[in-house]
Image: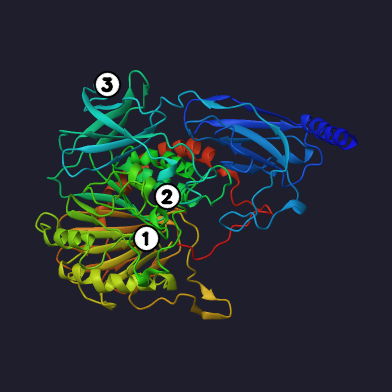
């Protein structure tokens, strides 16, 4: 009996201590993704610099199943026991709640870690919990809007997410206040049992994904600006967006291309947020705005899309981040290791035992396959009983003077397989009088300075099986991700530089859009003259700057520019002429061993128009991106959180 009374007294004591801590949120209702909530607290006695605020959705999540967390020390007044934190939230189609926990250095569990081997916060001492926060249009409002091409020149696909599967549609037209054309939509979803492993199919990683709607706007006039919105009268409509339709009669091609971007989050979580991805989105949006109202463009994201790794809400954060771009221009993707790879994947030959690992976090391509719908309708079995087919593996389309081809380096690409047959047939059928330039894109590189042992076998097979196709069919450019740097090679085949691109594609690695674990090209500390990854003679330019690649082409010339995120300026350029010449140069003079310099007059559209819109764009991003991320403090100098940098791909 004494023990019982003692236990009751203990809990009453804890309750009385905890009741001194108060927490409030304002407002308690948000309208849409990106709106900011302010969380205030007071009454924390003997505060620790590890005390933390947990962010939970749905509200009944267990303590260790948070969406994310912030240290109270992110508030400048935390040592007084009171403080406040403001952060933007993404609509997860469920309410939020916030909890404050006390945590000290002595309670750190070294076995309970995030992906960077940093300790995850302890949940033994709950101090207080807030009221619930909701989104006013949590079920009704369409969000995560993104466009893509179909196989037909006069169509545009639009996809979006809502909380329920009730009927929606897309309406569109050439006049903003007269959207008379209607396109029906089809809603689908995936379930927890469709995932192949934890964390994707566990309670810690799974969240309700909502319904993914897919609609095709048809009978479009070519090269015309269209306005559109998605939703329904009953459930509500999105904002009105616009795009420029494809024009098969135009010779001009404009594209923004990169790999390995991921997204940033306004909080710490189980995986690392990619802060640099914000700058990539910012500068690409600048370039898109500079195009004006009559120039179609595309975005090409070649693998390692969100880096969710089985934590499903990261996909919501990713689509919220890219919507300003993807609602304006088609956003095309190919599959990477972090979307697909898991040991049970169907195609895994003996030589690939150390190539394809657990990088998808148990997603096994499901989210990627349902949230995107690329042209071509390519698919492969997933190897799971309940899982849907893996889609969006290999496809192609024409835009202006360029034939774009996307392939999968994660599924069978060897001679005799379905993908190889597609690639062979596709490359052999290109009309070079219409599209003189051919660009092939895939995730893992065929050529790279970063010779990670894990990828050696796949590089060898790519050179053995794919390079002969590229050479025979005069592929102009091959673009790759996976290595989180920029690197451009000479026109090359069989590891040997050629004089012209015909028979010697120009290979570029462009996986520098956000993921911040990168190979080190700097000199070794004890051998200043020997880099960790020495630059071979066939490597024309290597850049450590995050950024993206900008493509501009007509029938005579294709120009690829490497734009750096720290200043939005061009750092490397290569011009490829239809006649065969490759003109290599760089903006900073670090490289020019191949060909001669050029004035790159083809970039007129960026240089002229961007000056006029820079004020508008900067104003927009001060409001949208600064509130979204910088206040988050991710990567701050808190002793319990150390960003480990390594050559993770």
> Which of these two is toward me, 635 or 535?
635
- Ranked by sequence position, the earlier of labels 3 and 1 is 3
In the current view of this chain or complex, which residue is farthest to the right? 2
The answer for how far apart the CA atoms under marks 3 and 2 are is 32 Å
Closer to us: mark 3 or mark 1? Answer: 1
Residue 164 coordinates in the image, percent (x, y): 39, 28
> Could you tell me if the residues under marks 3 and 1 are in contact, i.e. CB atoms within 8 Å?
no
- Ranked by sequence position, the earlier of labels 1 and 2 is 2
Q: Quadrant of residue 8?
A: top right
Residue 561 coordinates in the image, percent (x, y): 32, 58
In the current view of this chain or complex, which residue is farthest to the front? 1
- Ranked by sequence position, the earlier of labels 3 and 2 is 3
Q: SS of the residue at dot 1? A: loop
The answer for how far apart the CA atoms under marks 1 and 2 are is 15 Å
Describe residue 46's horizontal placement relative to residue 637 as left or right.
right
Q: Quadrant of the C terminus?
A: bottom left
* Residue 481: image tag: 1
Instruction: Judge the density around disc 2: few (<14), some (14-19), many (≥20) Cα neighbours within 10 Å.
Output: many
Instruction: Judge the density around disc 3: few (<14), some (14-19), many (≥20) Cα neighbours within 10 Å.
Output: few
From the viewer's perspective, is residue 403 above or below residue 51?
Answer: below
> Could you tell me if the residues under marks 1 and 2 are in contact, i.e. CB atoms within 8 Å?
no
Whether residue 293 is visible here, answered yes or no, is no
Closer to us: mark 1 or mark 2? Answer: 1
Residue positioned 37% across, 60% down in the render: 481
Q: Which residue is mark 3?
A: 177
Q: SS of the residue at dot 3? A: loop
The answer for how far apart the CA atoms under marks 3 and 1 are is 41 Å
Residue 29 coordinates in the image, percent (x, y): 54, 24
Q: SS of the residue at dot 2? A: helix
From the viewer's perspective, is residue 86 above or below residue 561?
Answer: above
* Residue 280: image tag: 2
């Amino acid at each position: 009996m004494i023990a019982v009374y003692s236990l009751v007294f203990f809990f009453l004591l804890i309750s009385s201590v905890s009741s001194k801590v108060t927490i409030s949120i304002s407002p308690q209702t948000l309208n849409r993704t990106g709106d900011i909530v302010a969380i205030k607290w007071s009454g924390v006695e003997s505060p620790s610099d590890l005390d933390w605020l947990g962010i939970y959705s749905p509200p009944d999540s267990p303590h260790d199943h948070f969406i994310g967390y912030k240290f109270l020390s992110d508030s400048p007044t935390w040592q007084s026991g009171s403080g406040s934190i403001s952060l933007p939230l993404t609509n997860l189609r469920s309410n939020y709640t916030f909890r404050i926990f006390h945590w000290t250095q002595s309670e750190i569990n070294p076995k309970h870690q995030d992906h960077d081997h940093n300790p995850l916060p302890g949940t033994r001492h709950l101090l207080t919990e807030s009221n619930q926060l909701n989104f006013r249009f949590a079920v009704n409002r369409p969000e995560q809007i993104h466009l893509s091409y179909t196989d037909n020149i006069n169509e545009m696909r639009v996809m979006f997410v809502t909380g329920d599967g009730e009927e929606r549609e897309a309406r569109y037209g050439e006049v903003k206040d007269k959207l008379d054309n209607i396109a029906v939509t089809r809603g689908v979803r995936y379930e927890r049992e469709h995932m192949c492993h934890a964390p994707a199919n566990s309670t810690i990683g799974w969240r309700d994904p909502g319904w993914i709607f897919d609609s095709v706007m048809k009978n479009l006039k070519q090269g015309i600006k269209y306005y559109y919105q998605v939703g329904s009268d009953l459930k509500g409509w999105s904002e009105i967006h616009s795009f420029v339709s494809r024009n098969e009669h135009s010779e001009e091609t404009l594209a923004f291309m990169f790999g390995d971007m991921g997204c940033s989050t306004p909080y710490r979580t189980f995986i690392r947020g990619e802060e640099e991805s914000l700058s990539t989105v910012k500068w690409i949006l600048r370039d898109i705005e500079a195009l004006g109202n009559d120039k179609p463009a595309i975005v090409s994201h070649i693998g390692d899309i969100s880096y969710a790794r089985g934590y499903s809400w990261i996909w919501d954060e990713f689509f919220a981040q890219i919507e300003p771009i993807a609602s304006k221009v088609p956003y095309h993707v190919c599959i990477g290791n972090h979307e697909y790879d898991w040991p049970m994947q169907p195609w895994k030959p003996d030589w690939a035992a150390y190539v394809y690992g657990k990088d998808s976090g148990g997603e096994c391509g499901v989210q990627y396959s349902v949230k995107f719908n690329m042209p071509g309708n390519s698919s492969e079995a997933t190897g799971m009983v309940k899982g849907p087919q893996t889609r969006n593996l290999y496809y192609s389309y024409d835009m202006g003077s360029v034939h774009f081809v996307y392939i999968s380096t994660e599924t069978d690409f060897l001679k005799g397989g379905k993908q190889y047959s597609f690639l062979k047939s596709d490359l052999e059928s290109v009309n070079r009088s219409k599209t003189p330039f051919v660009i092939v894109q895939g995730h893992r590189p065929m050529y790279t300075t970063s010779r990670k042992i894990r990828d050696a076998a796949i590089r060898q097979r790519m050179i053995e099986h794919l390079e002969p196709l590229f050479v025979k069919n005069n592929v102009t450019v091959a673009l790759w991700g996976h290595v989180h740097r920029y690197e451009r090679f000479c026109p090359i085949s069989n590891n040997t530089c050629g004089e012209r691109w015909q028979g010697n594609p120009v290979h570029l690695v462009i996986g520098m859009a956000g993921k911040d674990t990168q190979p080190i090209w700097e000199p070794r500390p004890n051998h200043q003259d020997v880099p960790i990854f020495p630059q071979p003679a066939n490597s024309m330019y290597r850049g450590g700057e995050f950024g993206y690649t900008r493509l501009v082409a007509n029938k005579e010339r294709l120009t690829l520019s490497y734009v750096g995120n720290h200043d939005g300026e061009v750092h490397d350029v290569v011009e490829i002429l239809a006649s065969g010449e490759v003109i290599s140069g760089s903006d900073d003079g670090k490289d020019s061993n191949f060909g001669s310099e050029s004035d790159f007059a083809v970039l007129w559209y960026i240089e002229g128009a961007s000056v006029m819109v820079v004020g508008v764009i900067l104003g927009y991003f001060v409001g949208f991106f600064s509130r979204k991320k910088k206040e988050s403090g991710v990567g701050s100098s808190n002793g319990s959180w150390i960003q480990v940098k390594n050559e993770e791909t």
